[in-house]
Amino acid sequence: MGRHTRDLRDACLGWVVFCALAATLVGCRAPSPDWNGTWKLNPSRSNFQGPIFTISVSGDGEYRYDDGRSSFTFRCDGKDRPTAKDRTRACVKSSVTVLDLTQKENGARTSANHWELSVGGTVLTVTATAFRPSGSAITGQIIASRMSGSNDFVGQWRDTSYVRRHADLALRLDRQTLHLSYPSGGQYVDAPFDGADASVYGPHASEGLTYSARMVGRREIQTLTKRNGKALTQGSLELSNDGRVITESWWNPGQPTDRGVFVYEKE
């Protein structure tokens, strides 16, 4: 066999090996098709009671909402008060048990929140509406039970409807993007797998909330939630070997052992 023939054979063999290796790598990086579909939360296998938030009011009447991850203040005087560049928030308190918050960007409404206390003040219902430039508005509801306080909206509250809003999970993955939504809560995000921050949309998504994702093998996705660039929670989505269960975990970056866990089963 001549040298030219051997070189040609070796070159062809090398190209075949390279192509096979490349195909294997692409296949390993591609997410499992088992991710795609709709999933139902199994509360008995999950571990999360719902977030706690606090509402306080200063001596001069300024309210403050704080859930440990985000906070904001407002005065119920009906005025559009600046909150960020081109954004405003206004509050109207029509009675001791009802107030309405409206947020705008460049003068156009982006969201509205209707707060209403039950008789006796033990339950707070928040009806949130997100307005989109195109398409219909998205509405969701938070129901919280009072943990402390007895006057006005002031006190500590537990969001008892959080689990219900996350009762369903819908996923669609391609090679570049994670398309994730919680239909019961109207929340959704399209996050590229390169770890870039993607905006979270929905009636309960706070301003500046983002979500990023990275594939770790075919059956695990690492996630990071931020607000205005600050890390709020790290997390992961793990797909079982039989493709029938997704375990969603999340934790404060400074407290990795204190985790919330939702277990979803394929419908």
Image: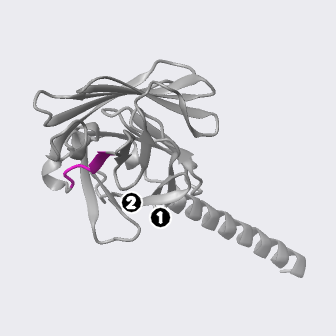
Q: Along the line of sight, which residue is nearer the eye, 116 or 223?
A: 116
Residue 121 in picture, x, y percent from top left: 15, 34
The residue drawn where x is 39% and y is 48% is 35
Mark 1 Cα within 10 Å, few/some/many (few <14, many 20+)?
some
Q: Along the line of sight, which residue is nearer the eye, 174 or 145?
A: 145
Determine whether the residue tagged by mark 2 lies in a helix, strand or loop. strand
Q: Is residue 44 magenta?
A: no
Q: Quadrant of the C terminus?
A: top left
Residue 107 in picture, x, y percent from top left: 60, 23
Residue span colored magenta: 48-56
Q: Which residue is mark 2?
A: 236
Q: Along the line of sight, which residue is nearer the eye, 115 or 229?
A: 115
Dot in front, 1 or 2 = 2
Q: Is residue 214 visible?
A: no
Determine whether the residue tagged by mark 1 lies in a helix, strand or loop. loop
Residue 96 in picture, x, y percent from top left: 24, 27
Residue 232 appears left or right of 148:
right
Q: Quadrant of the N terminus?
A: bottom right
Q: Which residue is mark 1?
A: 216
Kind of residue indicated by mark 1: Val
Contact? badges 1 and 2 (CB < 8 Å): yes
Q: Quadrant of residue 38?
A: top left
Q: Which mark is residue 97?
A: none
- Name which of mark 1 and mark 2 comes first in the sequence: 1
Residue 10 appears left or right of 84:
right
The residue drawn where x is 10% and y is 31% is 120
The residue drawn where x is 58% and y is 22% is 108
Kind of residue indicated by mark 2: Ser
